[in-house]
Amino acid sequence: FYTRLKGKPQGILLAVDLGTGQTITLAQIEESNAQAVAEWLQPLVDQLGVEVIVTDDLASLGVAVEQVNCKRQICRFHALRWIGRTLRELRPQLDEDWQESLDEVQRIVHDMPPDGQRLLYMLWQRIGERRGPRNKQSTALYKLRQLALRLSEHWEEYALFQNEPGVPATNNGTEQAILPWRLRSRTTRGFKSWAGLEAAFVLCGSAFA
């Protein structure tokens, strides 16, 4: 999440034990900086014996999780939200012939069938075979094709919760840790110091482990 620290926007990363809901630590790191994220995560992974990290769908977080040799579960809530938004944007740009394909993607990500990865890959292949001259619809088809490929390539990260007992499907525990602080921070214009920001978390009930 982002806040203002010493008058400037600052990216903050929050680590939460999703089993207990306990906040582990905060860090002043931009989530787009994969190397910095990995360097922050590595001591936590080593000290706590972390095997799975649940994140949103940002590509840099996937790179960081891979660097620290952990498995990744992409938050199902975040995934369904952006996938649904993408499908809604594509629907009016495609003619009737492709509406069923949009429905197929939506059905796969909602139902999470065991062969979801294969079905998405087959859809990617079909779209490639039927591309026509470059126009508004072909651009939308390209986006649909890329969506199917992205979901297929990262299917294990979307579906890890189905195969690994105890892995949560979402990072809602992190959102719950942030929410009280976010509500409190609306009454301020930011924080003058890092210590003040951490203290605000404690006051909001997000005490550190």
Image: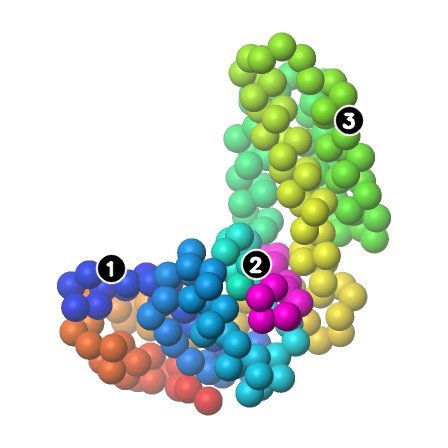
Q: Secondary structure at mark 3?
A: helix
Residue 137 position, x and y percent, is: 59, 17
Which disc, if any, is residue 9? 1
Which disc, if any, is residue 126? 3
Question: Tag 1: residue type?
Answer: Pro
Q: Which residues are magenta?
A: 66-78
Q: Secondary structure at mark 1?
A: strand
Q: Which residue is mark 2?
A: 62
Which disc, if any, is residue 170? none
Looking at the image, which is closer to me, 190 or 205?
190
Q: Quadrant location of residue 2? A: bottom left
Question: Tag 2: residue type?
Answer: Gly
Badge 1 crowding class, 10 Å Cα cut-off, few under 14, some 14 to 19, many 20 or more, is few
Q: Is residue 89 shown above or below 56?
A: above
Question: Tag 3: residue type?
Answer: Arg
Check the picture and name the quadrant holding the N terminus: bottom left
Q: Could you give the CA–CA distance between mark 3 and mark 1, rounded to whole angstroms? A: 45 Å
Residue 46 is covered by the magenta coloring = no
Foreground tag (1 vs 2): 2
Q: Is residue 75 shown above or below 106?
A: below
What residue is at 69 percent from the left and 18 percent from the top? Answer: 131
Badge 2 crowding class, 10 Å Cα cut-off, few under 14, some 14 to 19, many 20 or more, is many
Looking at the image, which is closer to me, 108 or 158?
158
Here the colouring is rainbow
Q: Earlier in the sequence, mark 1 or mark 2?
A: 1
Q: Could you give the CA–CA distance between mark 3 and mark 2, rounded to whole angstroms? A: 28 Å
Q: Secondary structure at mark 2?
A: helix
What residue is at 64 percent from the left and 16 percent from the top? Answer: 95
Q: Could you give the CA–CA distance between mark 1 and mark 2, rounded to whole angstroms? A: 24 Å
Q: Is residue 22 shown above or below 3?
A: below
Foreground tag (3 vs 2): 2
